[in-house]
Amino acid sequence: MVVKRLWFFVTLVSLQLHAQSSDTVHTHDKKKLKSLIIISGAAYTASLVGLNELWYKDSERQSFSFFNDNPQWKQIDKAGHFFSAFHLSAGTSRSLQWCGVGKTKSDVWGSVTGFLILLPIEIFDGFSANYGASTGDLLANAAGASFYFGQNRVWNEVRIHPKFSFQRTHYPSLRTDNILGNGLTTEIFKDYNGQTYWLSFDMDKFLKFPKWLNLAIGYGADGMVYATESENSAAGYKAIRQYYLGLDVDLSHLKTRSKALNTLLFVANMIKLPAPAIRLSGKAVTFHVAGL
């Protein structure tokens, strides 16, 4: 699991780093487009080969089949697929615009690519006896790509930004099999209890509001020592969903003369920074400082 999530993250960030140079849209440049396709295609193919070697090589093969993992982990993993597909779509679109491809066409192909980049994971899973392809993952991938495309068709820009935050929990220590991680690096990807996924709204695009300040709604869960409700109950744990309403800092409006700093700000805007929020956890409503 952690290898696959690291693969998602590296692919996502590499596209975003490349796309950051697309602030200036040039006239259509076939050489740039050809180079983008060749280099990105080669890097992507190499990453799939590496992923197969690291994660699937020793797994017993089976005829392609599906596995219903939708009841697991309170669907936090599905939110992660939505988040990844959205930002992969955005990164691809910006890269195409850098090559001079029109915005509408870039958004279409960016969204299609954002879905297709994640599709091989489900194919690998489908042929692995340890997993099975997930219809829930496929739907979440499609929803994330569509969310990017839809906003650009309605507003010609992104006004609602999917974001991610993580806070360490004690739950990994309750498992001896490292299912929830062992150390910060793996826990970020494996401990769903610490993950929160957000939709951050550019309020200044809807009403009079400071440009740098957004409102955000978040979704997470707590008490998930095991994947399903029945497993948790049998072990004496109660998993609950958590909902957040809070403030967020919008870094997309900040520009500097440094390309390196602009790139850092661009990538950092995928992360929900700490800010005050109201949390609904079960029946309890509390004030919480939410964010990475």
Image (tube, helix red, strand yellow):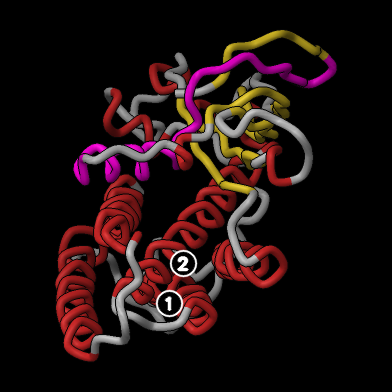
Mark 1 and mark 2: span between their CA atoms?
Answer: 6 Å
Q: Residue at x 49, y 76 (%)?
A: 103
Q: Residue at x 56, y 46 (%)?
A: 162
Amino acid type, residue under disc 1 in the picture = Thr
Verify CB contact (< 8 Å) between mark 1 and mark 2.
yes
Q: Is residue 66 left or right of residue 10?
A: right
Q: Along the line of sight, which residue is nearer the eye, 130 or 30?
A: 30
- Mark linked to residue 89: 2
Dot 1 or dot 2: first in sequence order is 2
The residue tagged with tag 1: helix, strand or loop? helix
Question: Bounds of the magenta span?
Answer: 258-283
Q: Which residue is mark 1?
A: 113
Q: Is residue 173 above or below residue 117?
A: above
Q: Residue at x 40, y 32 (%)?
A: 180
User: Can residue 104 be spotted in the picture?
Assistant: yes
Q: Pinpoint residue 121: horizontal percent, then vertical percent.
A: 38, 69
User: Can residue 139 be spotted in the picture?
Assistant: no
- Mark linked to residue 34: none
Q: Is residue 213 left or right of residue 59?
A: right
